Each structure stands twice: as structure tokens, then as C-alpha cells.
Image: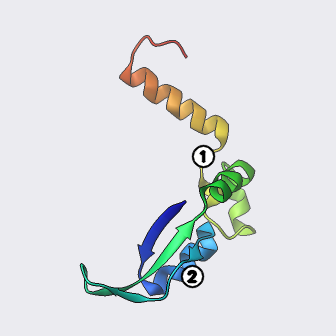
Amino acid sequence: MLLMEVNPRHVAYYRRMLGCQILGAERLNRRVSAPAVLLSLDLNYTREQIRRLGGRPEQAACEKSLYPFAFSEPEEAGIIDRLNRSVWPGKPS
């Protein structure tokens, strides 16, 4: 689970675009002297949405979330492989 504290005016965006849930009522964040709402994001839900929609930006028109813009699993694996090879040249894939 991911926890995040956001300004109340951004709550609807995070709920709609990522599927966040509200964990607490609005309160003052004293460090920044601004109102805040505590949200949670179930990472199992996130993983499933990326598996279902990742790498399909054309779905963004009908699927109002950020998940179509995530990398697909094969794209992610390729990126990780390229990063590993750049850090450890000669390492087998």
C-alpha cells in the first residue's frame, strides 16, 4: 500500500486517475501550513491495472485513468534490461 498526502483540491484527480481511497478527513499539514487529505493506493490494484491497460495510450480516451500511459510488462522488462546492461556492461540478459 502506498500512502500519500495531497491538497484537498487534488483528491478527485487521484481517485479518478489512480484509484486512490481516502483514509482520513481533511486536516492542516503544519509543515507547509496547507490543508491535506491522506490517501492510500493498493499496489495490487495498481499492478492489475498496469497489466490490463499498460502500453495502450489509445485506451485513455475511454479509460479515464493514467494506467494506459504506463509501460506494458514487455516494455518494462526491456527498459530494465537496458538499464542493467548500462550499469553492468557484458552482463548476460
| Viewer can see residue 68 | no
**Callout 1, which amino acid?**
Phe
The Cα atoms of the two marked residues, 1 and 2, are separated by 24 Å
The percent coordinates of residue 87 (x first, y second) are 37, 24
The crowding category of the residue bearing disc 2, from other C-alpha atoms within 10 Å (few below 14, some 14 to 19, many at least 20), is some
Specify which label sits upstream in the sequence, 1 or 2. Answer: 2
Tell me, what colour scheme is on the image?
Answer: rainbow
Q: Could you say whether the residue bearing mark 1 is in a helix, strand or loop? A: loop
Residue of label 2:
12
The percent coordinates of residue 72 (x first, y second) are 65, 44
Residue of label 1:
71
The crowding category of the residue bearing disc 1, from other C-alpha atoms within 10 Å (few below 14, some 14 to 19, many at least 20), is some
State the quadrant of the N terminus. Answer: bottom right
Q: In percent of the image, x 59 and y 71: which residue is there? A: 20
Corner quadrant of residue 57 = bottom right
Q: Could you say whether the residue bearing mark 2 is in a helix, strand or loop? A: helix
The percent coordinates of residue 90 (x first, y second) are 43, 10
Instruction: Tell me if residue 47 comes above or below residue 64 in the rendering.
Output: above
Instruction: Tell me if residue 31 comes above or below residue 86 in the rendering.
Output: below
Instruction: Tell me if residue 90 comes above or below residue 43 in the rendering.
Output: above
The percent coordinates of residue 34 (x first, y second) are 31, 86
Instruction: Tell me if residue 42 comes above or below residue 22 in the rendering.
Output: above
Q: In percent of the image, x 73 and y 67: which residue is there? A: 63
The answer to which of 40 and 19 lies nearer the viewer is 40
Q: In percent of the image, x 71 and y 48: which residue is there? A: 51
**Callout 2, which amino acid?**
Ala
The answer to which of 29 and 15 lies nearer the viewer is 29
The answer to which of 19 and 44 lies nearer the viewer is 44
Checking the image for residue 6, the label placed there is: none
Residues at badges 1 and 2 in contact (C-beta under 8 Å)?
A: no
Q: Is residue 11 left or right of residue 47?
A: left
